Image (spheres, rainbow, N blue to C red):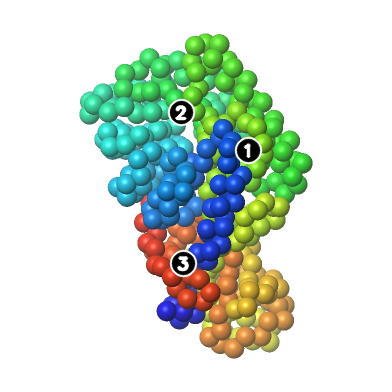
Amino acid sequence: MKIFDLPTPALIADADLIAENMLHMEEILRGKPIRLRPHYKSHKCAALANRQIASGAIGMTCAKLSEAEDLIFSGVGDVLIANQVAEPAKICRLALLAGMCRLTVCIDDIENAKALSRAAAYVGSTIHCLVEYDIGMNRCGLRTAEEYLETARAVTRLPNLRYDGIQAYAGYASHMVSWEERVEATRGNERKVAALADALRASGMEPAVVSGGSTGTAEIKAGGSVYTELQAGSYLFMDSTYRHLDIPFRNSLFVLATAVSCHQDAVILDVGVKGLGADQEDPILLDRAGERIPGRIELNEEHLKLFDSGWHPSVGEKAFVIPGHCCSTVNLYDWLYLYRGDAVAERIPVTARGKSQ
Ligand SMILES: Cc1ncc(COP(=O)(O)O)c(C=O)c1O
């Protein structure tokens, strides 16, 4: 089957470019003390997670309990939920899952840790814990080293919990286009986390794991870091937002779309925000030959309107759309088609599609 015969919009990815991106990440981290724990949110395909692990990743990171379930039921044996799980029913599910594999969750609240401990004690499992430190995201995580030490201490004393170390993620540094600014922001964060790790050791709590980092900071962290795990996700697919950075990964993910209405001043494609994550930059259009199509883009619910482009397709002609954000785009599709040349090589279910609880 040819990709151009797929009903559109279709989520497609170049199988060889995915393999190249995986190889580049392996090369960046080879021989370094930091190991890859890829973020699941970027592809949400259990089959791809298992391939990442087969090629050296130590386990997976995910954002949600339902994503963790998806990974664990597909056979992944080491999962980090890089988030807090606060509702009682979810805590019970988490405690049960922790009896099936090595499962780690983030904590920034002592009462939450007590609830996790009670649930794990009841079902007889052990929940691994990273206490989260806020390094400038202003979302989850403890804001000061003092609060951090108090919470970590509490976790070490609670039955059926194991304190493993630190979660600290700084997404704002990931997309800084200037290498110098990215290095400066990342090194500044590293210093904060290293100071916390020293304070933990001085208090008798060894942070065996320090987890965080991204596609944009991978090379910086590989150059020397307090981090032991890299949570990069987008490197496999990339998107138009990451495309600005001078990093060795290439766009492998596209939404194949069809021109459905063609005018002198505009071309209308059959994909809108229900088929393209629109939370970051505008998508980029390529023609069938892979050449960039210029123009101004507007996204409606089901349509992409292209103005001032100089591209004059016939109705029915296809275009490759590089999504603005790969992670929010894959979540909109049931299937990912891997292709080589113009032939579909494999159809992979997006098993964690919509798993946002
Ligand atoms: C907790 C966490 N870790 C890691 C990442 C890195 O992802 P990426 O490599 O796609 O930038 C993210 C991205 O949002 C994240 O939220």
Whether label 3 touches label 2, CB < 8 Å = no
Mark 3, secondary structure of its residue: strand
| Residue 162 lies in quadrant | top left
The residue most toward the front is 31
Q: Mark on residue 130?
A: 2
Q: Which residue is drawn at the image coordinates 71% and 41% (left, top)?
A: 182
Q: Position of residue 308 (x, y in %)?
A: 72, 77
Q: Name the residue tied to disc 1.
A: 222
The N terminus lies in which quarter of the figure? Answer: bottom left
Q: Position of residue 274 (x, y in %)?
A: 48, 65
Q: Which residue is drawn at the image coordinates 43% and 52% (left, top)?
A: 51
Is the residue at mark 1 in contact range of ligand 1, meaning its CB lies under 8 Å from it? no
Mark toward the start of the polypeptide (3 vs 2): 2
The residue most toward the top is 203
Q: CA distance from mark 3 to mark 2?
A: 35 Å
Mark 1, secondary structure of its residue: helix
Q: Position of residue 231 (x, y in %)?
A: 52, 41
Whether label 1 touches label 2, CB < 8 Å = no
Mark 2, secondary structure of its residue: strand
Q: Name the residue tied to disc 3.
A: 338
Identify which amino acid the numbered label 1 is placed on. Answer: Ala
Drawn side of residue 115 relative to residue 206, left or right: left
| Residue 304 lies in quadrant | bottom right
Q: Which residue is drawn at the image coordinates 61% and 44% (left, top)?
A: 28
Is the residue at mark 2 in contact range of ligand 1, meaning its CB lies under 8 Å from it? no
